[in-house]
Amino acid sequence: MIKVDRLRKRYGTHEAVKDLDFSVGEGELFAFIGPNGSGKSTTIRMMTGLLKPTSGAVELFGEEMGMERIHLKKRISFVPDTPDLIGKLTGREYLNFISSAYRMDEAAFREEQQKLVEMFELEGKLDTLVEEYSHGMRQKVALIGALVHKPDILFLDEPTVGLDPKSSRNLKNYLRDYINQGKTVFLTTHNLALAEEIATDILIIYNGENLAHGSLGELRSRIEEPDATLEDIFLKLTGGS
Ligand SMILES: Nc1ncnc2c1ncn2[C@@H]1O[C@H](COP(=O)(O)OP(=O)(O)OP(=O)(O)O)[C@@H](O)[C@H]1O
């Protein structure tokens, strides 16, 4: 579903992402973790065709991804770390806009929207202007917009930031079901407990480079601590105490 090949990004003289190589298959949840400024958002923006790589390539569904690849973009969703929704629309108008942009069947849209609105406890709040929503409510509407058309690949940059504990848990369960249906999820997060619980594959990026990659079990073997948590592994490999 995803293949990243020697991906690099330079901002001026700063090498933000250096020679990243990995792939993600169907039914996998790939957790991309790393300290602040390590290159996660830069990578995810290149993967979703929002930022041009300095060199290297990203393939989605076996085809090279790029800014103009609309037919690939139709099959994915991306929720950035700070979703920039249109403030003068209500939540309902925003979701209707998403539905028409993705040419969704009206009945399928209504049914899926209803499920997601219940999951995030936004009943009765969809007719409020987005600019009047709290940060968490905006995050929820952005997530509903990303999930409602059931993309084949879901890219999430820090999806649980701003969500209350119940919504975080509901999202976690939703993502688990989602990959069980053969969909693919690529997420960045500082919530290592969440990544430990649901990721099938984990990559730790450090200063733009692949520091470690594998399943939780493989990462535990790498530091020779069979009972280590992902937090233990992360801190050990990135030099934390
Ligand atoms: N538009 C830009 N121009 C110049 N430098 C940038 C730009 N965007 C990011 N950077 C730099 O690239 C590096 C990687 O940033 P990036 O936002 O990808 O990190 P991140 O891992 O997502 O961080 P965080 O966990 O804090 O969100 C940082 O050193 C950052 O300062």
Image (spheres, grey):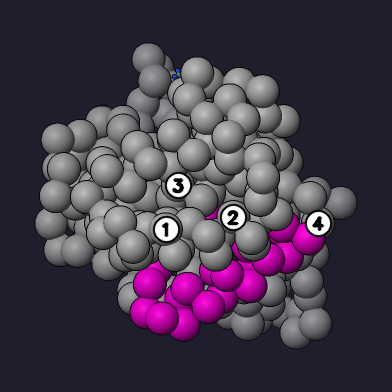
Q: Is mark 2 on a helix, strand or loop?
A: helix
Query: What residue would you read off at disc 4?
Result: 165
Q: Which residue is drawn at 48% across and 25% down?
A: 89
Query: What residue would you read off at disc 2?
Result: 117
Q: Nearer the viewer, mark 4 or mark 3?
A: 3
Res. 110 mark: 1
Looking at the rendered image, the quarter that the N terminus falls into is bottom left
Say which of 32 and 153 sits in front. Answer: 153
Q: Which of marks 2 and 4 is in front?
A: 2
Q: Residue at x 36, y 26 (%)?
A: 10
Q: Which of marks 2 and 3 is in front?
A: 2
Our reading of the magenta stretch's main secondary structure is: helix
Q: Is residue 161 left or right of residue 73?
A: right
Q: Is mark 1 on a helix, strand or loop?
A: helix
- Cβ of mark 4 under 8 Å from ligand 1: the answer is no
- Does label 1 or label 2 sit earlier along the sequence? 1
Magenta residue span:
166-188
Q: Residue 143: x percent and y percent?
A: 53, 49
C-alpha distance separating marks 2 and 4:
16 Å
Q: Residue 77: x percent and y percent?
A: 37, 50
Identified by mark 1, the residue type is Arg
Q: Quadrant of residue 50?
A: top left
Whether residue 2 is visible here, answered yes or no, is: no
Q: Is residue 199 left or right of residue 75?
A: right
